[in-house]
Amino acid sequence: MVSAADPGENRTSVWLVAKPATPVRRRTEAPSGLDRERITAATVRLLDADGLTRFSMRRLAAGLGVTAMSLYWYVDTKHDLLELALDRVLGEQSLPAGPYGSGGPYGSGGAGWQDGLRDLARGYRRVLAAHPWVAPLSAAYPDIGPHARAFDAALQRLMDATGLVGAVRTGAHLAVRQFLHGCGGAVRRAPEDDFCLALDVLITGIEARAEAGTKTTATATATADA
């Protein structure tokens, strides 16, 4: 069993430990037909079917037709496996690639990053809705797997396209991150229209700060040239 936020004490993320996906030692004794990819896929299916609180290595092993100890050839702990499952489902989302703004794939007139952010946020919400266990695991474990890093890189590109700099850019980035993670607990309760409205309010606020920054820069330049 694992609780909603039970990452264990003094553990290291699976992404920071070099452990081969296939056991190196005594390969002939490794369970036949198993690999980390298959185990991770089965973990996702079990979490989707039974939820996070009912997850156990014993139940997972039973579904795979192996002993629970067989799984430890591929992961050190159940927490490692939960991290792998978390990053796997984050990879289901298609990420906007940019470039943004005029001439970009989301339209012209400087509106590219807005549509890109809408795509990113709605895609993340779909992942949360399809896999309710993702939100509590994201709060319990560091999001540093390859798909999580790709998501953050896409968000960083969007923030770059806003034109915000310094503390204002940092604040906007934090606001978006908190919005996305905060919607996890309410994703099944809040209608899609309400989510989109809240997202539009957030985007409008970022636009306003970007426009204010542009005006301030223009005024400063004009004053310097006078």
Image: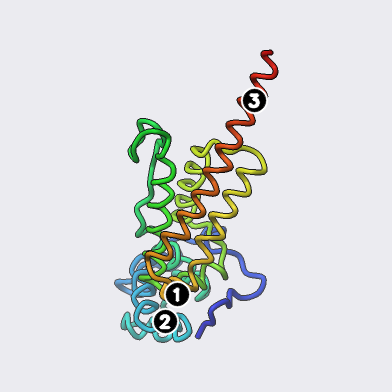
Cα distance, mark 2 to mark 1? 7 Å
The residue that mark 2 highlights is: 51
Earlier residue among tags 3 and 2: 2
Q: Nearer the viewer, residue 71 or 27?
A: 71
Give left or right: position of 176 versus 84.
right
Q: Are marks 2 and 1 in contact (CB under 8 Å)?
A: yes
Residue at the spot 42% in from the left edge and 65% down from the top edge? 194
Whether residue 161 is visible here, answered yes or no, is yes
Q: Residue at x 53, y 57 (%)?
A: 144
Q: Which mark is residue 219?
A: 3
Amino acid bearing label 2 = Gly
| Residue 60 against residue 93 in the figure, above or below | below
- The residue nearer to you, when weighing 87 against 65, is 87
Across and down, in percent, residue 16 comes to 56, 58
Assess whether mark 2 and mark 3 are in contact (beta carbons under 8 angstroms).
Answer: no
Disc 3 on helix, strand or loop?
helix
Q: Where is residue 28 drawn, in percent x and y?
A: 36, 70
Q: Which mark is residue 212?
A: none
The image's mark for residue 133 is 1
Q: Nearer the viewer, residue 218 or 30?
A: 218
